[in-house]
Amino acid sequence: MAFESVVTALVALGLLVALIQALAQRALIQAPPPPVPRELPAISILKPLKGVDADLEENLRSLFRLRYPAFEIILGTEDPDDPALPVARRVAAEFPHVRSVILSGATSIGFNPKVNNLASLASGARHPLLLISDSNVRVPDDHLRDLVAHRARAGGGLTWSLFRGVRGQGLGGMLESLELNGPIMGGSSALAQLFKIPCAVGKSMLIHRDDLAAIGGFQFLGQFLAEDQICAEELARRGRPVVVTGHLIDNVLGRRTLGEFAGRYLRWARLRRHLAPAAYIGEGLLNPVFVSLLGAVAFRSAHSAVVAGVALAGMSLIGAFAEHWLGLRRPAWVYPPLHLALSVLRGVLWFVPLISRTVIWRGNALALTARTRIELSKRAGAAVPPT
């Protein structure tokens, strides 16, 4: 009976934390924006590409359609034969009035392939203010104005945007959007902002070259897989602001199989495990649906069955409200089965990063140490030492 009470308490705590995350996310989205400065600095947008993401053409067009007086777009790939290059050239040709540069063949400065690409793109950028923009995001036309306004109010530093997972298709795509729109954005961003914990999820980040140079530049960040979070932590250590804006951008997901999502989830989990080990342990305990299911199997009592039902209903309601506040709509009936599947998957996979530190990402096998520092790298398909 004592253990059953512990399970009930953990379920209640997990539901409370999920609710606080959702409310913090809502507060961030509804916060009034700062005034846009009269002087708008020129910006170089760095767009690293790798393969043809879902709706890549429209994602790129959203950048070219930005309402901002002075900006350029630097796009590029590591591989000169990457299929994203023809797409980038085609979109750039539609907007001849916007200065754009398309590069290929990044120089290796570390094991992180995205940072290698960014370093190459930055070398071709004219302006000191840099926007790092992932290939799978779509932005509103006032995106730069909003980022600059938040950066001006904060007094410089790093400014990044809250995002929502959209257009997730297939079971994996639906689960990934639910994960992004709940635990990732609510916990990793809104809740961190509430408690003044430096945090950045680098879908779209605005930073000055001077701030970047102060932490060692891309040469330093290339040592880590979670380069966005490390950038935020290093800037905060130097007293520089790190702020997130609730002016939403879209992370366009496309179709995902369950296996593809599981692989992506494990990569994120390994990052969190190496960035904040204690917090990662807490994730395993604060998974109310999975914990309640374990309790129902262990105790086989009416009480444990009711607790499991309440956990699933509670997480479904919180998830539905969180996505509603993000401006997204799903049929209400899909939330219970999706949350059940996501909770079980999270619970089963939670153990893996505790015994394995190898991440397969962008064609590399990366072994992680503290703070996601990359210890070794091998091409995918090559032998990787047991972890």
Image (spheres, rainbow, N blue to C red):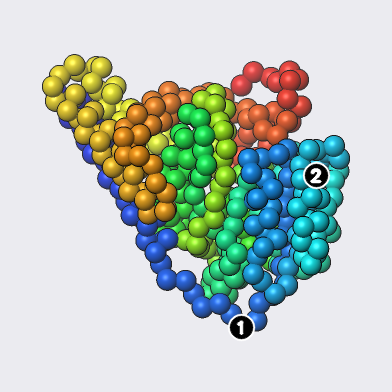
Few, some or many C-alpha atoms within 10 Å of disc 2 (few <14, some 14-19, many ≥20)?
Answer: many
| CA distance for labels 2 and 1 | 36 Å
Report the amino acid beneath label 1. Arg
Q: Is residue 363 visible?
A: yes
Q: Amino acid at mark 2?
A: Leu
SS class of the residue under badge 1? Answer: loop
Q: Which residue is mark 1?
A: 38
User: How many numbered callouts?
Assistant: 2
Choose the circle earlier in sequence order: 2 or 1. 1
Direction from residue 163 to residue 228 in the image, left or right:
right
Q: Position of residue 373 (x, y in %)?
A: 65, 40
SS at badge 2: helix
Give me the residue at 51% from left, 25% from top.
258
Residue 368 locus on image (x, y percent): 63, 34
Q: Residue at x 52, y 42 (%)?
A: 167
**Quadrant of the image occupied by residue 366:** top right
Q: Which residue is mark 2?
A: 85
Nearer to me, 380 or 192? 380
Image point 56% across, 77% down: which residue? 36
Mark 1: few/some/many CA within 10 Å (<14, 14-19, 20+):
few
Q: Is residue 278 above or below residue 377?
A: below
